[in-house]
Amino acid sequence: MVAISPFDLTGKHAVVTGASSGIGRAIAEAFARAGADVAGMSLDEAHETSAAIKDAGREAVMLVGDTGDAQAVERLSEAAVERFRGIDIWVNNAARLLVKPLVDTSDEEWHGLLGANLHGYFYGCRAAARHMVERGRGGSILNVTSISGIIGVGGIGAYTAAKGAIMALTKALAVELGPAGITVNALAPGAVDTPLNTDAYTPEVRRAYGERIPLGRIASSEEIADAAVFLVSDAARYVTGQQLVVDGGLVVNGTVGHGRD
């Protein structure tokens, strides 16, 4: 008898926000390869993601909408339940980046950035939790954060504030939802090549990352997605309230070039 891998998602139904590109697309496709059907929402059409999911032999439901809009997130939840008759996995990933010093950030920019980057995560967690608790079969909620919520990164203060708040939300929900058999975890990528970072990663930034990351390179979205599969799979069934850092060792690198004895 062949043992079933604990990483197998066959028969699971997942929701992934920001699924049209970058980390969200990679996660959606990785889930499909692991056996899950996937529903997603993005600001633009996710035709390529949908095609990849179907090529993996799974069902895909892709909506266009802003996760900073509570009603849009509810539509996503309803669409997934209607198509799949249930949600086992929910990944909050949709985000945008604002590179600007806090002292120059306007009220409108601050609240606009928090719309998708923080409020959207709350809306997603709430929709997922309500469904999973009512259904009574447990589930997994995964929030994509960032190492910027762990270390200080100047120039992206609003983004960093949102990511730090999401980790606090993750811990609180893990405690609240544990009795219902629902795990809630966070995934904190380091530097990743995605469309979100195209303008932010100047040649100088890339050189700095190459020097500071012990593994010597910026990650691909697929490397982050593989970690996501772990966190929502049975392999992580006893893991909740945690943040998995996937950064090539950047956060732990304290090397400054001390003189040798």
Image (tube, rainbow, N blue to C red):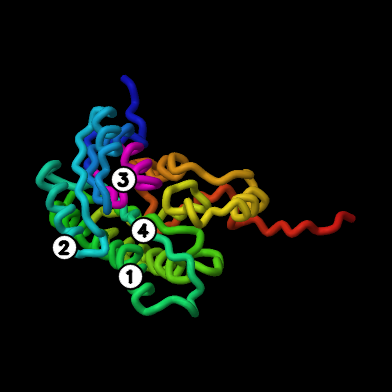
Residue 41 horizontal/vertical position (percent) = 24, 50
Q: Secondary structure at mark 4?
A: loop
Tell me the CA gap for discs 4 and 3: 12 Å
Q: Pick whichever, 215 or 171, lies toward us.
A: 215
Query: Mark 2 highlights which residue?
Result: 71
Give the residue drawn at x 51%, y 64%: 150
Magenta highlight range: 14-31
Query: Is label 1 or label 4 in front?
Result: 1
Of callouts 4 and 3, the N-terminal one: 3
Answer with mark 3 or mark 2, whichever residue precedes in sequence.
Answer: 3
Residue at numbered disc 4? 95
Residue on which disc 3 sits: 20
Q: Mark 2 belongs to which amino acid? A: Gln
- The numbered mark, 1 or 4, whose residue comes first in the sequence reads 4
Q: Position of residue 82 (x, y in %)?
A: 10, 46
User: In the rendered structure, are the residues bearing label 4 and label 3 in contact, judged by CB atoms less than 8 Å apart?
Assistant: no
Q: Nearer the viewer, mark 2 or mark 1?
A: 1
Query: What residue would you read off at disc 1?
Result: 112
Mark 1 vs mark 4, CA separation in Å: 11 Å
Most distant residue in the left direction? 82
